[in-house]
Amino acid sequence: MTSLVDDARSLTLEPGRLDKDAAAARTIFESGWKLLDNLSARSQRSADEKEDARKIVAAMSDLCWRFCRTHRSELYDRLTEQRSKAVRVDELLWRAGELWPGLVPTRDEVTAEAERMQADKDGREIRQGLFVSQLLNDPDIGTHLITSMLAPTEAANRQLDELVERGSLDLGSARVAVEGEVGYVYFKNPRYLNAEDDEWVEAVETAIDLVLLHPDVKMGVLRGDPVEHPKYAGRRIFSAGINLTKIYHGKVSYLFYLVRDLGLVHKLYRGFARDGDHTNEPEPESTIEKPWVAVVEGFAIGGGCQLLLVVDYVIAEKGSYFNLPARKEGIIPGAANLRLPRFVGEGVARQAIMFDRTFHVDDPDARALISEVHPRDELDTALKTVVDNATGSGMVSAAGNRRALRVQTEPLDVFRRYMATYAREQATCHLSEQLIRNLELHWKAKSRKV
């Protein structure tokens, strides 16, 4: 073990010799994983084994970080054919795993590790976060990657004609329906109170893309579908946030976080970037975007609350609430650390993110995010009034006004720098022992079944 740590630390990396450095690093990575596999399962290790594993993982992570920093331009150019291709972050990582074994995990390695409980994962996915963080740290590469993620998914392009013809589509964990000039995206995970997971991200991003692509749609609406939970059976619930039970059981990937915030959440905020629009301007030269309304019923917890920070109007059910219980979960609440302070101030944002402050929509402090509050039986009427008012007055200036607002609140480069930090820090949080302890303490995760 000591030899591997020393080898990882002493390996000299130089620009211009990617293949040679990759071969040397691969030997170290392979040795490191063999040592880890020979130890007891992570949750069953002795104190000495835990310390050995910590040193091995730290040495491999440091080597990955240095490698990606040294070679990031050549790495990215090879993965994107000299930046002529817009490659999504998930596909980028799968390609990197095949081209440079050991640097980041392959799809098969991540799939195999998903069979383990979260407490028994040694952190292959940490290197995905380190790799992406280094790409985002470079202004040119980071801008190219971010704008590549602001493109319609293949699934949306493939299903657009069907939506136009039929008017609605069931996408599994989401459904989309078009009524006149409005596209409605419904979150549909009834067993888990519309909580988020990998399948949810894929379905919701497709639904959002379809609303943005639809030629007759002028604006979008986000709303939860009715749920099955005995306490709320038949009620619409906006979102319970990330599925903590699935995290505990190892069934939420690290890529969930990157795809979610670089993909669907960012598209709600910025829309689509046009092909080839990768310039380092405060905003892409032109975007294809539409205003969004969210209808909060029951609660908007965690990720649900994060969505309220990127939409244009929020209608809430009287008595509902929103919060960011990230401290109890042990993770970073998406881009809320970047966005919430400009709504409520940094002091209140720290209370929400670090000290579990809950916002009840009827309270004055919540009105920075909430536009209207109505009793449950009046929400449909209120939504119709907002929609009719927005579409009836024309939407010609909506995209321009959104871009003008973003220039002074969140220029593209500010988002890039935030996501560079987020990619690195979230990877460590997602694979930490503290996450498991928090879930067992605050979520009673041991007693919950997937």
Image (spheres, helix red, strand yellow):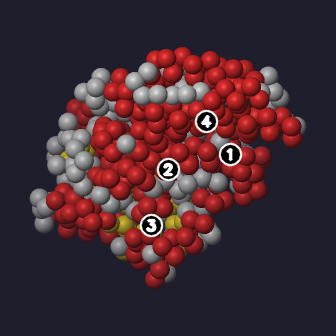
Please report the residue visible at 32 percent of the width from the left and 53 percent of the height from the top: 413
Tags 4 and 3 touching, CB below 8 Å: no
Q: Is residue 22 visible?
A: yes
User: As drawn, is 280 to the left or to the right of 102?
Assistant: left
Are there few (<14), some (14-19), or many (20+) residues within 10 Å of tag 2? many
Q: Secondary structure at mark 3?
A: helix
Please report the residue visible at 51 percent of the width from the left and 21 percent of the height from the top: 21
Tags 3 and 2 touching, CB below 8 Å: no
Are there few (<14), some (14-19), or many (20+) residues within 10 Å of tag 3? many
According to the picture, the residue beneath numbered tag 1 turns out to be: 432
User: Of marks 2 and 1, which one's residue comes earlier in the chain?
Assistant: 2
User: Of marks 3 and 2, which one's residue comes earlier in the chain?
Assistant: 3
Please report the residue visible at 54 percent of the width from the left and 16 percent of the height from the top: 23
Q: Amino acid at mark 2?
A: Tyr
Image coordinates for residue 89, horizontal then vertical, percent: 41, 35
Above or below 246: residue 102: above
Give the Cα separation between the discs numbered 2 and 4.
16 Å
State the count of labels: 4
According to the picture, the residue beneath numbered tag 3 turns out to be: 340
Image coordinates for residue 379, horizontal then vertical, percent: 38, 68
Tags 2 and 1 touching, CB below 8 Å: no
According to the picture, the residue beneath numbered tag 4 turns out to be: 61
